């Protein structure tokens, strides 16, 4: 449990920031603004990781999402023709609102009602080394599969971007 | 580590530690954190701002030597106050926002540019106890935050609604993304070599064995030097703000104070990169045992200054490259060379640890082996992937998209 | 009021719902993929919260899973850029002047 004025207020601040920026991704009419809000959302999530003492993941989040994914999405938006730069809803809008609302309600209900077996222990002191050991120890097979996935994605994007000439 | 007395100024961490202990004796817990944070922030700013003024003056004087002129020499003795005068002048200028600009990204871009580059100072070890945030994964922190500047470049270039700015931003980002990979691999070699991502531990490793990265890791040093020059948009790789092609690149439309922020952020980044090289390859605050007598922070700042001058030297010597040359150099030359070197260093460290060799015997051997390997890799890589093959370029991918001029070769 | 796993999971649920809405409702492929990214982030928050507040037998398993999610997200973004370049090439005109019209 996080207690005390500092962590609790930090949580609510970051939660409002994360939800607010995610909503702005939906609301923003200009797709590039939406991407910038998305990047702010990534930063807020990194802050939440830091609050949960997952310091390595927070840095990895900034490195991968802000530094790589965010920039790639920006690049993708810039390279598509202008009719693509609008952030409008399609025909499924109403259904999606219903579905999203129901899902959020169910998840909040479940989160509130489940008797969670929370530990009283404090946060992790340092996670980078432990994660590294876990990745080449117990999770070695998923780790290798992930590397294969990356190679496949790389080859796929090269083939897609090459074209015919 | 036993604490030295507060008046032991060989390490400015000592008085701060004493102060924090004193605050902790009577004050609440959170007050210690607040005081520590304030002191750290004040210390970082107290280093960044004066060093900017001095280094800008120094770089201008130093570059002038290369171009057989004197450089600024009118304001103050040797022109020392020139940066200050320029600062006042530019503050007095009007800062405007172009009518067609996208206002909020335009206004936010300088801030997004400046904040990460100042935050980077938090993990740099200026002395044994002089580090604001002694993070266990400091290298990841450095790499992560230096990637954030890319977003700012994008925001600035796009929000200005100016085609030079946009083209500058596109080029800059294509280059930043390409050169980040060899830079990170070079730092990864250092991590493999020292066995830690903590910058303080990296420094202590080099101090303990007297084995600087410079002696043992020549290839990562060169690769990091080159790729950071590219990431800093400095002259051999300044296609993002090539004056003769693009006005000023992504900050074409910025004026007055907002321009200063961009300019200062680029300078700060240069200082940070010089500091990272000093930490990872030049032994940080250590100097072969002399750091017991000379304060570590003076050694560290001197090393930063030397590396900064090397950057100035590179800037004053080399002409600007074309974008296809730069991209080909990153992907076809530096990436394979760094990968091969990374494997070699990993094997060496594994041998050293498994066979239990003494460091005194192993490290000179590794140094010779690595320098030989560096020679083979650089010469061989040059033969195989070298610039000679792309003198007559085929049209590279994403070429028109980043706004380069295409030579007729079809 | 203390903040525990309930609040984090609830936050994750809200973010997941927003991401789901974006992924379903948006017409633009890039916006749809942005929704997927928000959903991945929401799941990551839940993973890290479980790792932090409900240790279990392997406390770091949740954080390791987040590393894999990051990998998938990066691969996805790279593919998205490739698709965007393919779309760009489909356009006939490559006039530099037209790059300004990317701005809506």
Image (spheres, coloured by chain):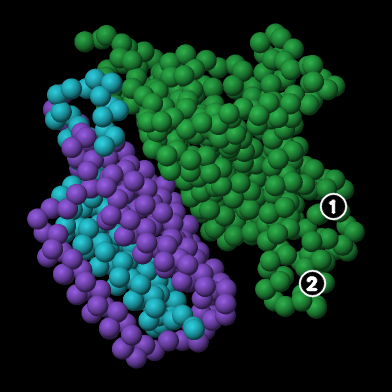
Quickly name the residue at label 1.
B10
A26 horizontally vs A2: left or right = left
Give the chain ID for the purple colour: A
Total marks shown come to: 2
Residue C69 makes an appearance in the image:
no
Q: Spot the cyan chain and give its letter.
A: C
Dividing the picture into quarters, in which one does residue B266 lie? top right
Task: Point out residue B106 in the picture as x, y percentages from the top left corner.
Answer: 45, 38
| Chain at tag 2 | B
Q: Nearer the viewer, residue A44 or B295?
A: A44
Q: Secondary structure at mark 2?
A: helix
Residue B345 image offset from top left, x and y in percent: 51, 45
- The residue indicated by pointer 2 is B23
Please tell me whether residue C41 is drawn above or below residue B267 in the rendered image: below
Q: CA distance from mark 2 to mark 1?
A: 22 Å
Does residue B262 appear to the left or right of A100 in the view shown? right
Helix, strand or loop at disc 1? Answer: loop
Question: Which dot, 2 or 1, sits closer to the camera?
Answer: 2
Mark sitting on residue B69: none
With B41 as the anchor, is B165 left or right in this view? left
- The image quadrant where one finds the C terminus of chain A is top left
Residue at left 38%, top 26%? B162
């Amino acid at each position: 449990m996080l207690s005390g004025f500092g962590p609790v207020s930090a949580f609510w601040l970051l939660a409002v920031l994360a939800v607010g920026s995610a909503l702005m991704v939906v609301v923003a009419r200009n797709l590039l603004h939406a991407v910038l809000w998305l990047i702010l959302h990534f930063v807020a999530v990194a802050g939440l990781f830091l609050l949960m003492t997952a310091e390595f993941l927070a840095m990895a989040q900034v490195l991968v999402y802000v530094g790589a994914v965010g920039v790639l999405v920006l690049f993708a938006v810039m390279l598509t023709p202008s009719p693509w730069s609008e952030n409008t809803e399609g025909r499924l809008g109403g259904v999606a609102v219903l579905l999203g609302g129901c899902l959020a309600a169910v998840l909040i209900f479940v989160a509130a009602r489940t008797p969670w077996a929370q530990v009283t222990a404090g946060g992790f002191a340092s996670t980078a080394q432990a994660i590294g050991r876990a990745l080449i120890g117990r999770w070695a097979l998923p780790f290798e599969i992930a590397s294969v996935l990356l190679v496949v994605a790389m080859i796929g994007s090269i083939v897609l971007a090459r074209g015919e000439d | 580590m036993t604490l030295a007395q507060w008046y032991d100024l060989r390490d400015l961490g000592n008085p701060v530690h004493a102060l924090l202990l004193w605050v902790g004796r009577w004050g609440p817990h959170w007050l210690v954190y607040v005081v520590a944070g304030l002191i750290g922030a004040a210390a970082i700013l107290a280093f960044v701002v004066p060093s900017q003024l001095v280094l800008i003056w120094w770089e201008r004087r130093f570059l002038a030597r290369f171009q057989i002129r004197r450089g600024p020499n009118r304001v103050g003795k040797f022109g020392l106050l020139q940066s200050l005068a320029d600062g006042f002048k530019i503050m007095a200028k009007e800062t405007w926002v172009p009518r067609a600009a996208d206002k909020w990204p335009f206004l936010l871009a300088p801030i997004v540019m400046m904040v990460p580059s100042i935050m980077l100072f938090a993990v740099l070890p200026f002395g044994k106890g002089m580090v604001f945030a002694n993070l266990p994964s400091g290298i990841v922190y450095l790499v992560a935050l230096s990637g954030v500047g890319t977003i700012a470049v994008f925001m600035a270039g796009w929000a200005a609604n100016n085609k030079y700015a946009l083209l500058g931003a596109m080029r800059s980002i294509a280059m930043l993304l390409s050169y980040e990979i060899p830079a990170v691999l070079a730092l990864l070699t250092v991590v493999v070599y020292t066995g830690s991502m903590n910058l303080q531990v990296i420094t202590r490793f080099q101090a303990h064995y007297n084995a600087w990265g410079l002696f043992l890791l020549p290839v990562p040093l060169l690769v990091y030097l080159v790729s950071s020059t590219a990431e800093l948009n400095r002259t051999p790789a300044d296609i993002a703000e090539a004056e003769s092609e693009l006005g000023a690149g992504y900050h074409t439309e910025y004026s007055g104070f907002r321009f200063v922020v961009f300019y200062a952020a680029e300078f700060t980044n240069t200082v940070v990169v010089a500091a990272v090289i000093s930490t990872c390859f030049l032994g940080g605050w250590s100097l072969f045992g002399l750091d017991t007598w000379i304060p570590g922070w003076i050694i560290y700042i001197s090393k930063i200054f030397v590396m900064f001058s090397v950057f100035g030297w590179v800037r004053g010597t080399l002409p600007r490259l074309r974008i296809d040359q730069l991209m080909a150099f990153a992907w076809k030359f530096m990436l394979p060379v760094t990968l091969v070197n990374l494997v070699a260093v990993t094997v060496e460290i594994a041998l050293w640890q498994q066979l239990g060799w003494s460091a005194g015997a192993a490290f000179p051997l590794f140094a010779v082996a690595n320098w030989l390997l560096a020679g083979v890799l650089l010469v061989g890589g040059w033969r195989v992937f070298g610039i000679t093959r792309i003198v007559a370029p085929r049209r590279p991918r994403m070429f028109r998209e980043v706004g380069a001029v295409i030579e007729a070769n079809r | 009021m203390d903040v525990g796993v309930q609040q984090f999971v609830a936050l994750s649920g809200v973010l997941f719902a927003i991401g789901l809405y974006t992924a379903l409702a948006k017409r633009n492929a890039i916006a749809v993929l942005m929704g997927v990214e928000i959903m991945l982030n929401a799941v990551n928050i839940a993973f890290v919260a479980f790792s932090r507040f409900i240790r279990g037998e392997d406390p770091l398993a949740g954080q390791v899973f987040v590393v894999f999610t990051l990998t998938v997200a990066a691969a996805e973004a790279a593919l998205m850029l490739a698709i965007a370049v393919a779309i760009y090439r489909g356009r006939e005109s490559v006039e530099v002047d037209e790059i300004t019209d990317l701005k809506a």
